[in-house]
Structure formats: structure tokens, C-alpha cells
Image (spheres, rainbow, N blue to C red):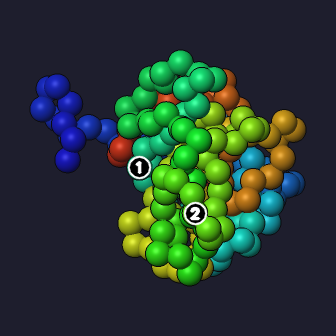
């Protein structure tokens, strides 16, 4: 367990994601006293996540690390390990591929998602531990905590917040942070 400088256990940080009752693809992310608007999957939340279903998994997912666009943003302060995204980085979303739900460097013939997107969604992109530690084919891939589209458009199953809010909370996030979708 990570310890503070005083030798005490480092505190776990919790981000709670609650869907709005009036819109299945919108949510509120609560982080301590902060309440932030968010977008979630276009089909809302699901307890039976499947590849391509557009749902955000109802689960508690640890933040594993992340990525940022170094040409668009200065180094971002965070307790998480954040790596710059380069043009060779892709995320495999093909269940039959041995690289399923993994970052791959270089070309990939199977279905994948480019990490260096033209839109700004992955200018800061945090990887949540959904189907990562114990991978199961067809149970969903590339479940990230990233930046929103204009108008809080729904995601493909991720959790997305405004860039200003992300910059605001990033310094407080670490490898013990858990995103709990309820």
C-alpha cells in the first residue's frame, strides 16, 4: 500500500458517477465536495457490458494511468503516470485479436481506436480498469475517463468531463483513485 511522507496509508480517492434521471447519457461526477457535469454512454449504464453496446459499465474501476496530447497541452500535473500520445499509438477493440483491450504501438490490422484523435477527446485520457486486469473477450474495451464533446454528447461507454474540470481534479488523482459508476 502506498504511504504518505508521515508513513500513514495514502487515502483512496473516489469519483462517483451518477446518471441523471432525466437523461440516460448524462451524469454528475462527484469528487469530494465537487459536482461536475459529465457525459456517459449513449445507452446509459449497464451491468452487462458487451463490446459495442454503447453502455457505461456499472462498476468500481481503479484509474491505471493515462495519456495526454503533449503538442496541445503542457505536462499535466497528476499523481497518475501520464504518457504523451504519439501517432503510432492505437487501442485494440477487436475481441478476436490477442491485443484486445490493450494499447498497441504501430499498425494494427484488426479494429482499433487511434489515440491521437483529431477531436480533443483524448487530449487527456485516463484508463479505467474495466476488463483490463482480467480480460474477457467481448466484455468491452477502451473504457476511459476523458474529455467531453461539445454539448455533452454521449460517449461510446466512457465517462467524459469538461477540460477545465479535468485539469482541476487531475492533481488529486492517483493509482488508488476509483471511479464508481452507480
State the SS at label 1. strand
Horizontally, residue 1 falls left or right of residue 138, namely left
Residue at 59 percent across and 41 percent down: it is 87
Badge 2 is on which residue?
A: 108
- Residue neighbourhood size for the residue with mark 1, other residues' Cα within 10 Å, grouped as few (<14), some (14–19), many (≥20): many
Observer-side mark, 2 or 1, equals 2
Residue at 54 percent across and 38 percent down: it is 86
Asked if residue 82 is positioned above or below residue 137 in the image, the reply reads above
Would residue 30 be seen by someone viewing this image from the given angle? no
Asked if residue 133 is positioned above or below residue 153 in the image, the reply reads below
| Dot placed on the residue nearer the N-terminal end, 2 or 1 | 1
Would residue 76 be seen by someone viewing this image from the given angle? yes
Horizontally, residue 178 falls left or right of residue 16, namely left
From this viewpoint, which residue is outermost toward the top? Answer: 74
Quarter of image, res 57: bottom right
Q: Which quadrant, please, contains the C terminus?
A: bottom right
Camera-side residue: 109 or 80? 109
Asked if residue 167 is positioned above or below residue 138 in the image, the reply reads above
Asked if residue 81 is positioned above or below residue 136 in the image, the reply reads above
- Residue 178 x, y percent position in the rendering: 45, 50
Camera-side residue: 113 or 19? 113
From this viewpoint, which residue is outermost toward the left? Answer: 7
Residue at 58 percent across and 35 percent down: it is 124
Horizontally, residue 40 falls left or right of residue 75, namely right
- Residue 68 x, y percent position in the rendering: 54, 34
- Residue neighbourhood size for the residue with mark 2, other residues' Cα within 10 Å, grouped as few (<14), some (14–19), many (≥20): some
Badge 1 is on which residue?
A: 64
- Residue 181 x, y percent position in the rendering: 59, 57
Residue at 17 percent across and 25 percent down: it is 5
State the SS at label 2. loop
Amino acid at each position: 500500500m502506498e504511504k504518505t511522507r508521515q508513513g500513514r496509508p495514502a487515502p483512496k480517492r473516489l469519483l462517483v458517477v451518477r446518471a441523471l434521471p432525466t437523461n440516460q447519457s448524462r451524469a454528475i461526477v462527484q469528487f469530494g465536495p465537487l459536482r461536475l457535469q459529465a457525459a456517459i454512454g449513449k445507452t446509459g449504464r449497464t451491468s452487462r457490458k458487451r463490446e459495442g453496446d454503447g453502455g457505461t459499465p456499472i462498476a468500481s474501476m481503479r484509474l491505471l494511468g493515462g495519456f495526454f496530447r503533449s503538442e496541445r497541452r503542457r505536462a499535466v500535473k497528476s499523481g497518475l503516470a501520464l504518457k504523451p500520445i504519439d501517432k503510432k499509438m492505437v487501442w485494440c477493440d477487436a475481441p478476436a485479436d490477442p491485443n484486445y483491450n490493450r494499447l498497441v504501438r504501430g499498425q494494427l490490422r484488426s479494429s482499433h481506436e487511434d489515440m491521437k484523435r483529431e477531436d480533443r477527446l483524448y487530449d487527456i485520457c485516463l484508463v479505467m480498469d474495466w476488463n483490463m486486469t482480467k480480460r474477457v473477450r467481448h466484455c468491452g474495451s477502451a473504457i476511459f475517463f476523458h474529455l467531453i464533446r461539445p454539448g455533452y454528447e454521449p460517449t461510446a461507454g466512457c465517462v467524459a468531463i469538461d477540460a477545465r474540470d479535468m485539469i482541476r481534479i487531475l492533481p488529486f488523482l492517483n493509482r488508488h483513485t476509483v471511479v464508481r459508476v452507480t
